[in-house]
Image (spheres, rainbow, N blue to C red):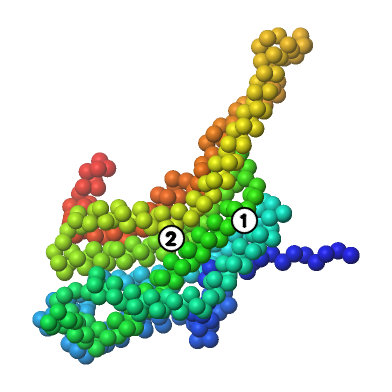
């Protein structure tokens, strides 16, 4: 009697298909079982966060000016947050869902996880899914948003001047009607969605850490120069929308300082470099958990292929250099030369094996995505004509 086929747990893996908010979206017909209705979801959430602010500001007379330092329509940072970054973060769910699941499946398809370790691999998946579906974790995020999140906004972001959302009096901010919606609805929505992504990135780290503890089948001569884990470097592209949204947030903040406080883009060069480096570490850092097994595989490969190479070149030397070959053996065209070259190439691959499953190209692409939203701010330093002139000079 044959055993029933084993259920592949990788088919259930998803960082986004679960949790209280996902179930709420399903009941509200804002998503299907596989994240359908993306445009409806983006439109509804964005309008809830932004449209009441516009309407209330128009009613209050703070939309265009009226002696206000920062009218609603001039609030660059706020518009970047709710009209650009928020939709990108919502759309990122579909991208991550479609690209991370194949990466998890690749551990089995490529034989990186041997059959004997499959139960522990399945346990790692089950652990992540339980945390993803946790009601307590998402409730904790809500508490954080309405306590630390609002405190941080008040202490670090709020402008001590007359704006569309508040009027300062006696060291206090008296909120406008738009301000109340902004503080207690719009900002919490955005912060919750953003923190939820940070939680998912942490769950991805936990999953990778548990997998790295398995007895993995890492091949030192694998052509990806990462023992067969090179697919993980490409999987990080799934998080590009999140990095793009973070870049939009930074761009909006800097633009607000430039237009509202007269700052210069040059003033933020250190912050920009640190910002890009931090988010690269946030996405690529979890892959470093594979450094110990990759280092062990490289040491083993250098030892084993070094021993093999020594035996082969000794035989080659005795046969073709010291006259051990038969008189009728022809040196030119012999397979021994090709075998020697192939062995040398294999040993070189082991020597070049990386200790992290990503390369310089992966890092530069992610850095470019993160920094891309900052490009338009260059026009605050150079006019478009000057910029085109400088580019033409550089080319010609």
Q: Residue furthest right?
A: 1
* Residue 181 left/right relative to 62: right
In the drawing, what numbered circle is on residue 240? Answer: 2
What secondary structure is marked by label 1? helix
In the drawing, what numbered circle is on residue 310? Answer: none
Please name the residue shown 59% across and 59% down the image: 104
x, y (%) of residue 396?
25, 41
User: Which of the 4 image quadrants contains residue 196?
Assistant: bottom left
x, y (%) of residue 23?
53, 81
Disc 2 residue crowd, few under 14, some 14–19, many 20+, Cα 10 Å: many
From the viewer's perspective, is residue 265 above or below residue 352? below
x, y (%) of residue 4?
80, 66
User: Which of the 4 image quadrants contains residue 98?
Assistant: bottom right
What secondary structure is marked by label 2? helix
Image quadrant where one finds the N terminus = bottom right
Compute the Cα span from label 2 to label 1.
20 Å
């Amino acid at each position: 009697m044959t055993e029933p086929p084993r259920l592949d747990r990788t088919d259930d893996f998803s960082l986004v298909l679960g949790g209280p908010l996902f179930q709420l979206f399903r009941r509200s017909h804002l998503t299907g079982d596989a994240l359908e209705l993306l445009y409806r979801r983006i439109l509804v959430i964005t309008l809830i966060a932004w449209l009441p602010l516009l309407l209330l500001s128009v009613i209050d007379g703070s939309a265009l000016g009226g002696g206000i330092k920062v009218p609603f329509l001039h609030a660059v940072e706020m518009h970047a947050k709710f009209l650009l970054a928020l939709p990108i973060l919502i759309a990122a769910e579909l991208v991550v869902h479609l690209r991370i699941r194949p990466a998890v499946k690749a551990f089995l398809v490529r034989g990186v996880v041997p059959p004997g370790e499959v139960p522990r691999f399945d346990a790692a998946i089950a652990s992540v899914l339980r945390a993803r579906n946790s009601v307590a974790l998402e409730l904790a995020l809500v508490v954080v948003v309405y306590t630390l999140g609002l405190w941080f906004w008040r202490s670090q972001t709020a402008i001590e001047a007359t704006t569309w959302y508040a009027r300062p009096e006696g060291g206090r901010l008296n909120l406008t009607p738009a301000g109340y919606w902004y503080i207690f609805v719009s900002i919490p929505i955005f912060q919750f969605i953003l923190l939820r992504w940070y939680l998912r990135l942490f769950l991805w780290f936990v999953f990778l850490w548990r997998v790295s503890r398995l007895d993995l089948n890492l091949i030192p001569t694998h052509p990806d120069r990462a023992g067969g884990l090179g697919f993980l470097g490409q999987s990080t592209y799934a998080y590009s929308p999140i990095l793009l949204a973070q870049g939009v947030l930074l761009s909006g903040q800097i633009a607000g300082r430039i237009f509202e406080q007269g700052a210069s883009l040059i003033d933020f060069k250190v912050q920009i470099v640190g910002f890009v480096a931090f988010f690269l570490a946030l996405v690529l850092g979890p892959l470093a958990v594979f450094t110990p097994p990759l280092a062990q595989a490289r040491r083993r490969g250098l030892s084993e292929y070094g021993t093999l190479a020594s035996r082969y070149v000794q035989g080659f030397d005795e046969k073709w250099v010291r006259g051990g070959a038969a008189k009728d053996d022809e040196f030119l065209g012999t397979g021994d030369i090709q075998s020697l070259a192939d062995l040398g190439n294999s040993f070189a691959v082991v020597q070049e094996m990386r200790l992290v499953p990503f390369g310089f190209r992966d890092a530069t692409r992610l850095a470019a995505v993160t920094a891309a939203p900052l490009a338009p701010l260059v026009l605050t330093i150079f006019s478009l004509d000057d910029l085109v002139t400088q580019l033409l000079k550089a080319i010609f």
